[in-house]
Structure formats: structure tokens, C-alpha cells
Image (cartoon, rainbow, N blue to C red):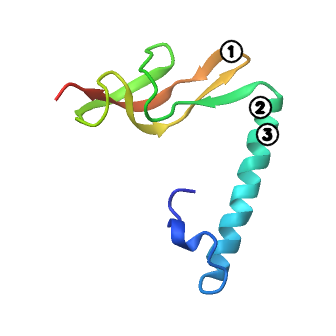
Amino acid sequence: MDAVPEEYRNDKENHAVLATLYEGIKMTDDGLNKAFEKNGLQKFGKVGDKFDPNLHEALFEYPDEKMEPGTLGQVMKVGFTLKGRTIRSAEVGIIKKA
């Protein structure tokens, strides 16, 4: 979803095929996420969240003066919980002190 540039997502005049494809994928993603949540499956792992070794798998650390150390700076793969239990850890990059 993030691979489609923001300016092309709704440009149905100049990039009709790309805008329509994006709209279809977005609708499918929304429906799938709604079905997951209905059955107790939830995504987690957002940039800025506090690192928790029970939920996150740290792949690397890097300095960033704009963000607080010990928080998630990049999310490579989101994690999932099923009815409160972690079934896949989020793979993340952690902010360290500069």
C-alpha cells in the first residue's frame, strides 16, 4: 500500500489504472482486517510505540535524535495477537541514544 505514491492514489484522470488498483487493494485490505478483528486477530507494532521484548523482535538499533530511545523507529513486519496472545512478533528497528 505504501509503494503507491500519495499523489497517484486518487488521480483517476492521469493514472486511472493505478488509482483503481489501489482502491481495490485498499477495500480488500479493509475487509480482511475487519474479518480478522471480528475473530480476535489484531495487528500491532507502530512507529513510536515503546519496545516490548514480549511483543517485538529487534532486528537492529539506530540513532535518531528526533525520537525517544527505546521506541520503535521502523517496523519491518507487523505483529499479530489472537485473543490477547502473541502469535507473531513484530520485527522492528529500535531507536538508541545518539
In the image, what residue type sits under mark 1? Gly
**Mark 3–mark 2 distance (CA, rounded to whole Å):** 5 Å
Percent coordinates x, y for residue 3 in the rendering: 50, 61
Percent coordinates x, y for residue 39 in the rendering: 82, 27
Q: Is residue 73 left or right of residue 35?
A: left
Percent coordinates x, y for residue 40 in the rendering: 77, 24
Is mark 3 in CB contact (under 8 Å) with mark 2? yes
In the image, what residue type sits under mark 3? Lys
The residue lying at 50 percent from left, 37 percent from top is 77
Please give the residue where the numbered disc 3 appears in the rendered image: 34
In the image, what residue type sits under mark 2? Glu
Q: Secondary structure at mark 3?
A: helix
Is mark 2 in CB contact (under 8 Å) with mark 1? no
Q: Is residue 60 left or right of residue 54?
A: left
Identify the mark nearer the N-term, 1 or 3.
3
Q: Is residue 15 left or right of residue 91?
A: right
**Mark 1–mark 3 distance (CA, rounded to whole Å):** 17 Å
Quarter-of-image position of residue 59: top left
Please give the residue where the numbered disc 1 appears in the rendered image: 84
How crowded pointer 1 is (Cα within 10 Å; few <14, some 14-19, many 20+) is rated as few
> Does 27 appear above or below 20?
above
